[in-house]
Image (spheres, helix red, strand yellow):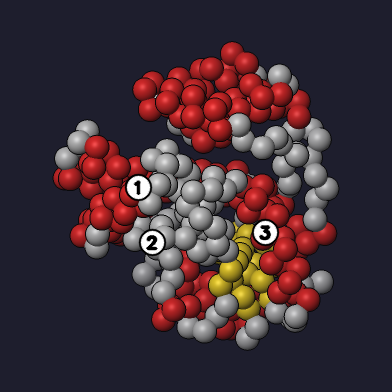
Amino acid sequence: MKIIPAIVGPTASGKTALGVELALHLGNGEVISCDSVQIYKGIEIATAKPSKEEMRGVPHHLIDYVSPHIDYTAADWARNAGEKIREIEARGGRPIIVGGTGFYLRTLRKPLFESPKTDSEIRDRLRRLHEEKGAEHLHAMLEGLDPEAARGIPLNDYVRSMRALEVSLQTGEKISNLQSNRAETPEFAERIRIFALAPPRDQLYERINARAEAHFEAGLVDEVRRLLDQGVPPESNALGSHGYRRAREYLSGTRTLESAIEKTAQDVRNYAKRQFTWFRKEEGVRWIEGFGDERRVQERIFKLLKTELA
């Protein structure tokens, strides 16, 4: 039984490079990106997508995969990732999941229920409420409709609150009730082994701060302006991630450039904290300490995988 390694952890922790090293170490490894922003075409600067040089000849999947006009979901990713796993294994390759979107990975291991397609009118209404009153207001609305679902969603996770509200408003059913009708767990789920990187917080935050400045210097604002000119909705999932959100605010005149950079760094630091918390709650995660000494981290993972990858 060949296992499927999943390299996860907070943003800027070195997952991409490690995934490539593991693929090369195995000889036939192929990377499946588990990232909710890298999935979009044309969303480049603040996504940390690996360049061709960084890929080092290793095939990568689910990067630049869908249009930014599409609100791609965790269920979409789980379905596509499952297809890629089967394709890679059918030709004798070894799939390696790499990324920090924990909800995507959980959905792959424990599929969601069959939910209704998004109603654009309801989605737009909820987006306006989020813009006007914030994530906690959406969460309070959900508490009124479905207290059980609200208990499982953090106050600031407006994306999940919004989706739970959409389902309730469209179907008249509580999402917490519908979730009992989950799709069948795929056979490969039990073969996934999760390895989470745990760099020292101070060093991680230094890297995050530097990245935020670098992204704006590299033209993040111009990229967002181009995407908006192409008709990508301002509140789309593609433009909802940290740096893109603050660049939109700068373009709208509600935030200075300096504030946009500072707020982006703060957003990403907070996101990294939530990633730590998320993966510490997942079952069977093996934590790999270290930062800066990538070779030592790689050797630690290779050692843990040695018997199972044989």
Disc on the earlier residue, 1 or 2: 2
Disc on the earlier residue, 3 or 2: 2
| Residue at image mark 1 | 228
State which quadrant residue 86 falls in: bottom right
Disc 3 element = helix
Is residue 144 left or right of 255 when viewed as pictured?
A: right
Under mark 3, the amino acid is: Asn
Q: Nearer the viewer, mark 3 or mark 1?
A: 1
| Residue at image mark 2 | 44
Under mark 2, the amino acid is: Glu
The residue that appears at 76% across and 57% down in the rendered structure is 189
Disc 1 element = helix
Residue 177 appears anywhere in the view: yes
Measuring from the top left, give residue 66's x and y in whole percent. Answer: 54, 57
The residue that appears at 36% across and 70% down in the rendered structure is 292
State which quadrant residue 59 falls in: bottom right
- Contact, CB < 8 Å: mark 3 with mark 2? no
| Residue at image mark 3 | 80
State which quadrant residue 192 falls in: bottom right
| Residue at mark 1 to residue at mark 2: CA–CA distance | 14 Å
